[in-house]
Image (cartoon, rainbow, N blue to C red):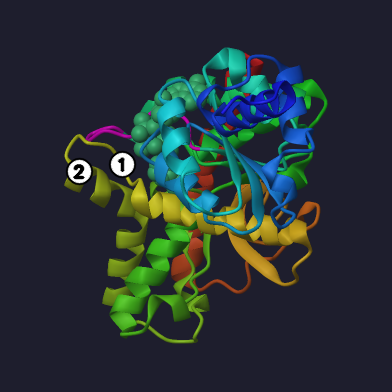
Amino acid sequence: MEQGGSSGSAAARRMGRLASHLRPPTSQMEEVSILRGSNCRAKGAAPGFKVAVLGASGGIGQPLSLLMKMNPLVSVLHLYDVVNTPGVTADISHMNTGAVVRGFLGQPQLENGLTGMDLVIIPAGIPRKPGMTRDDLFNINAGIVRTLCEGIAKCCPNAIVNVISNPVNSTVPIAAEVFKKAGTYDPKRLLGVTTLDVVRANTFVGEVLGLDPRDVNVPVVGGHAGVTILPLLSQVNPPCSFTPEEISYLTSRIQNGGTEVVEAKAGAGSATLSMAYAAAKFADACLRGLHGDAGIVECSYVDSQVTELPFFASKVRLGRSGIEEILPLGPLNEFERAGLEKAKKELSESIQKGVSFINK
Ligand SMILES: NC(=O)c1ccc[n+]([C@@H]2O[C@H](COP(=O)([O-])OP(=O)(O)OC[C@H]3O[C@@H](n4cnc5c(N)ncnc54)[C@H](O)[C@@H]3O)[C@@H](O)[C@H]2O)c1
């Protein structure tokens, strides 16, 4: 049967739209018209937020992108990496959840990937190999985070930014310096992801106490490397007490959880699956805050006045503008006070290293 000219071209346009995820847009104009056009599928879905994952093809990036595609608060999901985003995007886009997924490949497409985003999650970088400390990663990951944050400052300066790339103790100060230089820095919107430390602490404390880890809440403060990870076992909810041996075992296991995984993977990378879970949990908390939900409190490494250091991880209350309140540390016991002093010394050096990287 012969098709009429107008219905034929309508069908061709429909086919073009359906296949568009396989062909990332090449210009900003094209991207904006696709996302804002009357045919954007996001419009038919529940209203939601636009989220970008930078480093989406990696060990963390792929499962994190999958989990964000499952989040009902997400209406548009942008996947950016320097490799493999067409494949990851095609794969994830087949999930029958609401978010529209688009892929962006390589530096020339970074700006299109960032334009209009409400939340940007950064797991881009290289992971730790056995024998490497987080600081060994510094130079490569510092450069990657700088480039990505320059893009954020230009294309979505009001987005909430979740930094996963290690060493978080330095990459968050690096992001802050980039945003300061660009004149877009809002400390309420920059958050270092330390949720994996809390997730591990809840799991290990749950094991020791014989409780469901979902019912356990351990505040973990300080930073996100070795001794800077300071679990406050005196403030565990539900209230409980530990023997000195349990405190020593739990503190050491929580601080060295990353190394436990790096060694077990024996050269095949660092924590990716538990990290993706933790990052998705934290991103969901940020989105619920943006959405206006009340009482959302998570630990995060942020610009802070809780101690004399410019950055520190502690409990923060999330809301429509990002961080709405940084909660005080609460009473620490002697063991925790000693841990805090050690943590602050190392943190101070890592912060300085990050600041100097941008201002050298
Ligand atoms: N915050 C945490 O708790 C935590 C936990 C585990 C790992 N990490 C860190 O997360 C990062 C990623 O770990 P992974 O295991 O997913 O590594 P990976 O090597 O599997 O993936 C990293 C991805 O980043 C991409 N990438 C590299 N340069 C990029 C650039 N300039 N722009 C965009 N993407 C780029 C790579 O192509 C790759 O796909 C590492 O820095 C790792 O140390 C953080």
Label 2, on which residue?
Answer: 265
Looking at mark 1, is its residue's CB closer than 8 Å to ligand 1? yes
**Residue closer to the observer: 94 or 166:** 94
Residue sitting at x 49%, y 87%? 239
Looking at mark 2, is its residue's CB closer than 8 Å to ligand 1? no
Q: What secondary structure is found at the residue carrying circle 2?
A: helix
Q: Position of residue 207 (x, y in %)?
A: 29, 77
Q: Which mark is residue 110?
A: none
Quadrant field for ligand 1: top left
Whether residue 305 can be seen here: yes
**Left or right: 295 in relation to 250:** right
Q: What secondary structure is found at the residue carrying circle 1?
A: loop
Mark 2 and 1 residues: CB-CB less than 8 Å, in contact? yes
Q: Position of residue 240 (x, y in %)?
A: 44, 87
Residue sitting at x 23%, y 34%? 131
**Residue closer to the observer: 146 or 331:** 146
Label 1, on which residue?
Answer: 270
**Residue closer to the observer: 171 or 342:** 171
- Name which residue type carries label 1: Ser
- Name which residue type carries label 2: Lys
